[in-house]
Each structure stands twice: as C-alpha cells, then as structure tokens.
Image (cartoon, rainbow, N blue to C red):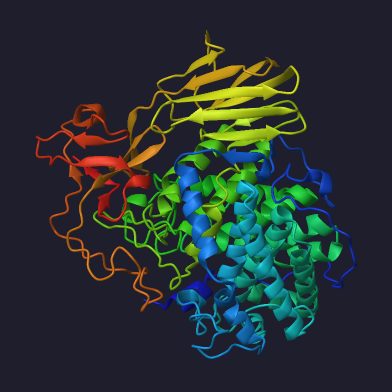
Amino acid sequence: MQSLTSMRFNTFNVIPTSGLLRGILTFGLVGQSVLGLAQYPGQASDKMKVPVSVPMKAKSFDLQDVRITHGLFRDNAEREGKWLLSLPVDRLMHSFRVNAGMNTPKPGSPTKMPRPLGGWEGLDMELRGHSIGHLLSGLSLQYASTNNEAFRKKGDSLVTALADVQRVLNQDGYLSAYPQQYIDRNIAGTAVWAPWYTLHKLFAGLTDQFTYACNQQALAIATKMAAWASKKLSPLTPEQRQKMLRNEFGGMNDAFFNLYALTGNPEHLKLAQFFYHKAALEPLENGQDNLNKAHANTFIPKLVGEARDYELTGNEKAKTAATFFWNTVVQHHTYAHGGNSDKEHFFEPDKLSKHLTGNTSETCNTYNMLKLTRHLFTWSAAEKYADYYEQALYNHILGQQDPESGMVCYFTPMKAGAYRLYSTPDQSFWCCVGSGFESQSKYGEAIYYHDDKGIYVNLFIPSELNWREKGVTLVQETAYPEEATTRLTIQANAPTQMPLYLRYPGWATAGATLKVNGKVVAVKQLPGSYITVNRTWKTGDKVELTYPMTLRLVPTNDDPRVAAIAYGPIVLAGEKGHANMKGTAPFHDPADPYQYYGYDYTIPDSIDHTIHMGGKPVTDWLKPVDGKPLTFQTVAGMGNQAVELRPYYNLHRQRYVVYWDLD
C-alpha cells in the first residue's frame, strides 16, 4: 500500500496537456479598500466589491442572523467550541515561529507552551499549519453563531501572532508553517504533501476572520499573501502550472475568487483562474464522469471554486462542471448517510456494495459537498439540494462527533462490525479534525434562505431567524427528528405580506399536514417540492407542519439485496457491542498519525449482518421500541437475532452495522 503522503500527492493520474492560460496572467497588486465578503450569494451583499453577476433563485442569510436555540446541533457546536478555546495560541503557533526562526524557548521554560502539537501538526509533517486555518474559520463561525466574545478574542490573538510571523519572514508576504521550498518542490513536480492545500486553509481562515469577526488585520495578512502568490506564480509556463496542479491544492481557486469578490482587485481574479486544473475539470464540463480512482477530496473543492467562478464571472462552463459533478456524486457515488469514497478515492459509479469497507466516507468530502450544495441551491432553489443537505448533515456530519468527548472521526466506516475511530484533543489534527472545527460550528447556515419576497425553510432545527430588512423574526420549535412536527411563529414589526416556502422532503411519502393558526390547510404539492403559504403575517401567527416518518430500505445502486434502513431522513445502525475492541480504541493512538488508514477493526467472526426478510416488508420484521425515540428492534425468528437499531448519528463507541445483507 502506498504511504499516505505519496497517495495524496498522486491525486490525478492523467498527465495534463499544455494549453493557453485561462486568461492572461499579468500579476501585480493594486491597492483596494475593502468592506465585506460573502462566500454564498446573499451574504453581506451591500459590502461586496464584486456582486454576483448571474440570476439567483434564493439567497443566504448572514450566519449572525440565525441562532440555534437548543437541541442536538447546539450541543455539538458547544462541544466543538470548548475544544477550539482549549488549544493554546503558543502551541498552535509553534511551527510557524520555528519556520520564521523566532524564539521558541526550551521545554520547561516558564515562557514555553507545554509541548508542540502532534499528529499532522508535528514539525516532521509537511502538512503542518493546515489546522490553524480551519481553527481561524471555526472561531469566526462560532462567534457569528453565538456572539460570544471569547471566540473573537481567541481569533484576534491568533491573527496578531500570524502577523508577527509574516513580518519576520519578510518574504514578499509569504506566511506558512513550512519553508517556501515546499512550494518549489510542488512547482517542480516532485513529491511533497500538498503545500497549496495548507495555504488554502490559511487564506480561508483569514478571510473568515474578517467576514465573521470583523478582523481587519486578517484581511491585510491575506492580501500580502496574495501579493506573494502573484510574484511566485507569474513566471510559470502553462505546462508548469498544470504540472503543479496535479498535486492536491484544496480550494485555492475558491479562496482567490472570494478574495476577488472582497477586494475587486483583478489580480486576485487572475490568481483564482490560475488554479484551473484542466485534466480534472474539462471532462466534467463536457459531461464526462472522470471520477473513478480520483482522490475525492482533491476534486470536490475544485468544484466549489468553479461555483464561485460562475457566480462572479458568469462562466457557463464552470456552472456545467459544478452541476454535472454534483449530480454524478450524489446519484452514483453516495452512501445512505450522505458520504462518499473508499480509501479517500472515488470508484466505479454505482458499485457501492463492493465498497463497504472500514475506509469509507472521508468526512472532509461531505464538508465540501455541503459547501457545493449551498451554492447550487441558490442558483435554482431546487428541493433536491435541500434533501441531500439534510441527508448528509443529520447522518454524516452530526454523526462525526463523539458526544461524550467531542472528538471526531476521519472515516465513517460502512464495514459491518466496524466502529468510528476518534481523534485526540491535541495529537491527531487530521484534515477531518480541521474541517470538523468548521462543520460543527456553523449549523445555522443552511436552515433558511430567502428570495426578494419570502423565506425558504429548508431544515427543521430549533432556531430563530432575524430578517432585518423585512422586520420579521421567525422562531422554529421542534424536537425533529424525534418528532415529525415543526412549529413556526412569526414576529413582525408591522403586518407583512410574505410567502413562506416550506420544504416538502422527498422522503415524506406518507403525506403532510399543514396548519396555519390552528386551521388545517390543504396540501396540494407532492414530496420533493415546496409548500407555499402566502399571506399577510402579523406577530403571533403560527404554522404547524407535520411530515410522518416511515421505515424504508435504502438499497445500494448495484445490488438491491444489500441495503441500509432509514426512518424518514435518519439512517439507522444496528448495535453490535464492544467485543474485541483493543488498544486505545475507539480513540486514535497518537503513536501512529496514520492509524485510521487501513485500520484493523479486529471484527469478531460472530458479527452477523444478515436479515432474513421472508419476502415481507420492513415494517413486519422491524418494530419500534417503546420509550426510545427513533429506536427499533428486529423481530426474532426466521433465523434472525434480535438486534436494536438507532440513529447512526447517535450510535457511538461501539460496533455497528449500517448495510445489511437481505435474504
């Protein structure tokens, strides 16, 4: 088996052909005053230097305008927030200061942090520094979501420390925890572990600090880094550029498109277009599924960047690529819980039953798929995007975090009898730890959208939305998914004529019940659409919406006899106990930074993952357990053991089965 480093370097096996640059690259920086950034259309639009140039069916609300009031998502976010605040600035900055030759006193010194960070942030790791970018984003997202000053102050401290390092390095704005030689190796096409990937996280974290926490210094750092990148990349030939882009570079195109939107500086647009990877993207523009054997999380961020290209420049090829890619991944490469890939790579389309292993569904993939989904939803307001968002959010992202420790997993194994392997507080720092800092901190971002007239209610999460422009507050109360009903209460400064677009999920085949101020309203729409309630609202008006949940099988595309079981939107997993869990399980052993990859789950032979159906529907052999919401038990008999199933997101620290062999 290849080492992880070499595997992540060889992310695309097609040698790119030479070609003209996508735009003339004449680098240089022009000073610009800047006011705000919106990664998603609709956010901070009054502050944008470059507005969205294409029609939008829906717009995002600012994260500051949505508050999650209680429930599962708030609990996860609070645990993540405590983790973010617990990591000392000096430890986070250690590798940056070492790279700059700054003072790092010996262990035991009263001015020294206890010890450097471990895992992927160790000084012997070429990817070191990536986590601080994610952490900057996570802190800013937590601040926007809660208005808790502790998150803003922690972010300010990190930004100030990074500015000190950038000043000492004094290399035309270069800033990183590793030397520029890593970039030189990347340009030369020699093996190195993804230096642009790491810089993408830093760019994104700095712009998030400016956007969500109003940190002007963060923007200044990012702008200087862009000046360095312009100077570094301008001499490259088209052939050198495509050679460099074979290595994983995260969402550098997305980062520079966002910086361009923020500054209006055409040189930032050129930088974004520089990171156009022909070998990966041209086939997608032509409707060709080129994903088999491709490294999944190398691909997905590129398409997020393509989405921003379309929004800011109107590039139709970018729109085609992003849309085709999303449809291909969701329809042909996605497991029941919303994740994708095996051993970090896509495989042949519609071959899920052949890839139920312990290395399925890298969580970063789903983090990035949800980013892409948000963009695509704003273009069309198609309900299918909200369906996928719910599927992946409730099952994969919510289920990434261990509710006892707050630690997160890298893979979510689909192998029968496996379990999730969790990180450690300061000795893992995998990519999925970093993206988890963000995913678990921004749960308010996709609950609501709006057009010029009304509000889309996409997710059923207890929350409060403040639509300042309309003078309307919308309060949502629900115990969903433990109950099928959500309740919306309007507060309005004055009577307001406004439509509510209520998502009617595709899984809700048992129908819907709608009440407005206690009166039943006929629902004529079908699942997979939106129910529109258009009226003049006044304070105290209430909407009650119920979607009965039913049990259903979710078969693999290639074999209907291999299936997961879902109840409404929630994927269920069968409890299989703790037998033979060895060593530090279910937590990562810090002695091996790559332990999760090819991990031996020591699955006992006694683990059974067959259900004998006897030709009967799922409701005949799976029954609800009294007093336990969302919990079911297989009916003993017909050769079946009695197994309890509960939500995948809520089954932790033990073995489980998601996909069953049906007989």
Q: Nearer the viewer, residue 132 or 383?
A: 132
Q: Residue 412: which quarter of the image?
A: bottom left
Can the viewer see residue 271? yes
Position above or below: 539 against 621: above
The picture places residue 325, in percent across and down from the top left corner, at: 57, 50
How many marks can you see?
0
For the N terminus, the image quarter is: bottom left
Can the viewer see residue 333? no
Q: Nearer the viewer, residue 441 or 404?
A: 404
Position above or below: 338 against 481: below
Identified at 25% across, 71% down, the residue is: 583
Identified at 59% across, 69% down, the residue is: 132
What residue occupies the far top of the structure in this picture?
A: 519
Looking at the image, residue 589 sits to the left or right of residue 276; the answer is left
The picture places residue 110, in percent across and down from the top left corner, at: 54, 85
For the C terminus, the image quarter is: top left
Identified at 70% across, 53% down, the residue is: 212
Looking at the image, residue 453 sits to the left or right of residue 644; the answer is right
Identified at 66% across, 62% down, the residue is: 153
The picture places residue 190, in percent across and down from the top left corner, at: 58, 84
